[in-house]
Image: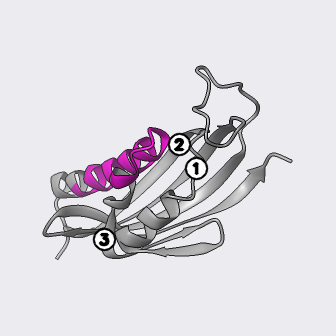
């Protein structure tokens, strides 16, 4: 059964919104929001580790320095509705990053800016479940990296 054009747009927008909310939550240090973006069986392939479900994501967020300031810019997003409960997305992720010293100090506002830390190609699988749209799998690979 194929989706109507309207249903495709609804699925695509819902999936895109989950991804935008994830990175916005990370950038604002809303780590509970980051964790809740993932399905119970979701996996985030992040920095060489597999973070399993919201609990794994939540645990990884405790390691993030309090002095870190990031901004994740999503561009060239392409979302495909697989069906009414599944979507696939790919996008470029440009990351700006600054960590203040000492590591427990709050980041300065505004933080010093340099060229982006990375530009990555990210891919996500998203599913709709009883609590709404969630990330089932997320991974990215750097295409450019600051040295």
What span is colored magenta in the figure?
11-32
Q: Residue at x 60, y 74 (%)?
A: 49
Q: Residues within 10 Å of mark 3 (few under 14, many from 20)?
A: many
Residue 109 pos. (x, y %)? 58, 21
> In the figure, residue 115 lies in which quadrant?
top right
Question: Which secondary structure, mark 3?
Answer: strand
Disc number placed over residue 92 in the picture, else none:
1
Q: Which residue is pictured at 30% across the width and 54% down the height?
A: 12
Question: Taking 108 as reference, is 85 above or below it?
Answer: below
Q: For the stretch drawn in magenta, what is the main secondary structure? A: helix
Q: Which mark is residue 39?
A: 3
Which colour assignment does the render follow? one colour
Q: Which residue has dot 2 on it?
A: 75
Q: Is residue 66 above or below residue 40?
A: above
Task: Determine crowd level at label 2: few under 14, some 14-19, many 20+ residues with C-alpha closer than 10 A.
Answer: few
Residue at 70%, 58% in the rendered image: 142
Q: Residues within 10 Å of mark 1 (few under 14, many from 20)?
A: many
Residue 32 in the figure: left or right of residue 97: left
Q: Nearer the viewer, residue 93 or 12?
A: 93
Q: Whole-percent x and y of residue 77? A: 47, 49
What is the CA distance from the residue labelled 1 to the residue labelled 3? 22 Å
Q: Nearer the viewer, mark 2 or mark 3?
A: 3
Q: Residue 135 in the image: x percent, y percent? A: 36, 65
First of labels 2, 1 by sequence position? 2
């Amino acid at each position: 059964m194929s989706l109507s054009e309207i249903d495709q747009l609804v699925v695509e927008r819902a999936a895109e919104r989950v991804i935008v909310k994830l990175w916005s939550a990370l950038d604002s240090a809303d780590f509970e929001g980051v964790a809740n973006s993932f399905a119970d069986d979701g996996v985030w392939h992040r920095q060489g580790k597999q973070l399993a479900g919201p609990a794994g994501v939540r645990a990884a967020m405790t390691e993030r320095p309090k002095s870190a300031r990031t901004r994740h810019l999503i561009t060239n997003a392409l979302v495909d509705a697989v069906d009414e409960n599944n979507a696939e997305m790919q996008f470029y992720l440009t990351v700006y990053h600054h960590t203040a010293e000492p590591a427990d100090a709050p980041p300065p506002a505004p933080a010093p800016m340099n060229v982006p830390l990375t530009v990555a190609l990210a891919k996500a699988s998203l599913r709709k479940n009883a609590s709404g749209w969630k990330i089932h799998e997320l991974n990215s690979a750097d295409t450019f990296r600051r040295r």
